[in-house]
Amino acid sequence: MKKFLIVFIFSIGMMATYATPIINSEANLTSQKELRKYVEVKVSELPQPVKIAVAKDFEGATISKAYKSEKGEFKLVISTEAGESQTLHANSKGEWIEKQ
C-alpha cells in the first residue's frame, strides 16, 4: 500500500510539473525591439531604386507609409488597387528582403 501511495504522489507531482506553462519572454522582447528599430520617413524621401522596384513588381500599388531602419533597410506599407494592404521590406538598392 505504501508503494502505491508513493507512486500515486509521484505521478501527481509529474502532472503538475508538465502542466506549468512556460513563458518565453525573450521572444517577446525581440519582437518589440524589431518594432522600435524603424523610424517613419516620407515617401518622397525614399531612394529612387525602391520606388522603381515597387512600381515594377507591384503594378498599380501605391506606397502608403515608409519606415527606415538603422541599417538602411526600408519597411514599406503598400496599398493595391483592390484596396488590400501589404508590408514589404527592401534595401536601398531596391532589392526585396525576406522577413520572418
Image (cartoon, rainbow, N blue to C red):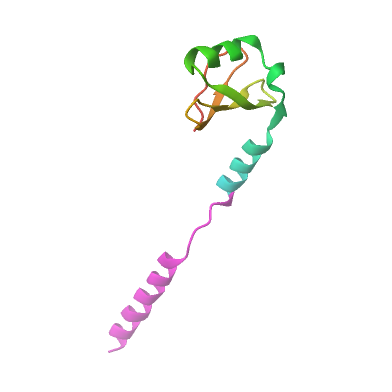
Residue 12: quarter of image: bottom left
| Picture quarter with the N terminus | bottom left
Marks counted in the figure total 0
Residue 10: quarter of image: bottom left
Which sits in the foreground, 84 or 53?
84
On whether residue 2 falls in the magenta region, the answer is yes
* Image coordinates for residue 87, horizontal then vertical, percent: 54, 30
Q: Is residue 20 left or right of residue 45?
A: left
Which residue is situated farthest in the bottom direction here? 1
Region of the chain picked out in magenta, as a range: 1-25
Dominant secondary-structure state across the stretch colored magenta: helix
Which sits in the foreground, 78 or 10?
78
* Image coordinates for residue 49, horizontal then vertical, percent: 60, 10
Q: Is residue 51 left or right of residue 10?
A: right
* Image coordinates for residue 83, horizontal then vertical, percent: 51, 31
Q: Residue at x 62, y 45 (%)?
A: 29
Q: Is residue 24 left or right of residue 4?
A: right
On whether residue 14 falls in the magenta region, the answer is yes
* Image coordinates for residue 62, horizontal then vertical, percent: 57, 22
Q: Residue at x 57, y 13 (%)?
A: 94
Q: Residue at x 67, y 20 (%)?
A: 72
Q: Residue at x 47, y 65 (%)?
A: 20
Which sits in the foreground, 4 or 44?
44
Q: Is residue 31 above or below residue 79?
A: below
